[in-house]
Amino acid sequence: MKPKQRAAYWRANLKVLAGCMLVWFTCSFGLGILLVDQLNQITIAGFPLGFWFAQQGSIYIFVALIFFYAWKMNQLDQKYDVHED
């Protein structure tokens, strides 16, 4: 891989990582702590939404982020021809 391609691959990787970190921060800190009082006014299946995000929703989102990151990195590996076969 040429240095220019390597830098582009790394930039794309950091872009995906920054997006995942932003979603992670928004869900865990934003929805689970900062907006918990506003979200607790909404109940789903008998549980306040803020409590749900703090206890379970963030975990589901984190697991989804893991699968998304793996899927996106596979796409980037194919694009920059660094995939494993």
Image (tube, rainbow, N blue to C red):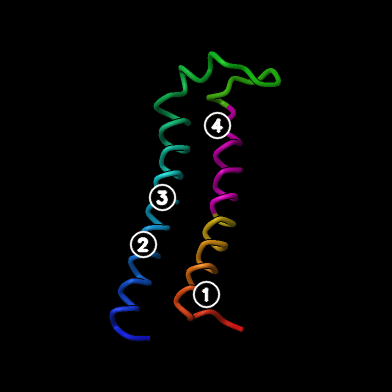
| Residue 21 badge | 3
Q: Give the extent of the magenta segment.
A: 52-65
How far apart are the alpha carbons under marks 4 and 1?
35 Å
- Name of the residue lying farthest toward the bottom: 1
For the point 59% across and 50% down, the residue is 63
13 versus 85 height, above or below: above
Quadrant of the image for the N terminus?
Answer: bottom left
Asked if labels 1 and 4 touch by Cβ distance under 8 angstroms, the answer is no
Q: Where is residue 70 drawn, in percent x and y?
A: 55, 63
Quadrant of the image for the C terminus?
Answer: bottom right
Q: 60 or 72: nearer the eye?
A: 72
The mark that comes first in sequence, 2 or 3, is: 2
50 versus 63 height, above or below: above
Q: Where is residue 14 drawn, in percent x and y?
A: 36, 62
Q: 10 Å neighbourhood of mark 4: few (<14), some, or many (≥20)?
A: many
Disc 4 designates what residue?
53
The mark that comes first in sequence, 3 or 4, is: 3
Q: Where is residue 64 drawn, in percent x and y?
A: 59, 49
| Residue 14 badge | 2
For the point 59% across and 57% down, the residue is 67
User: Label 1 amino acid?
Assistant: Gln
Q: Mark 4 vs mark 2: give the one in front.
A: 2
Instruction: Indicate left or right for 13 with 46 as reference.
Output: left
| Residue 78 badge | 1
User: Label 3 amino acid?
Assistant: Met
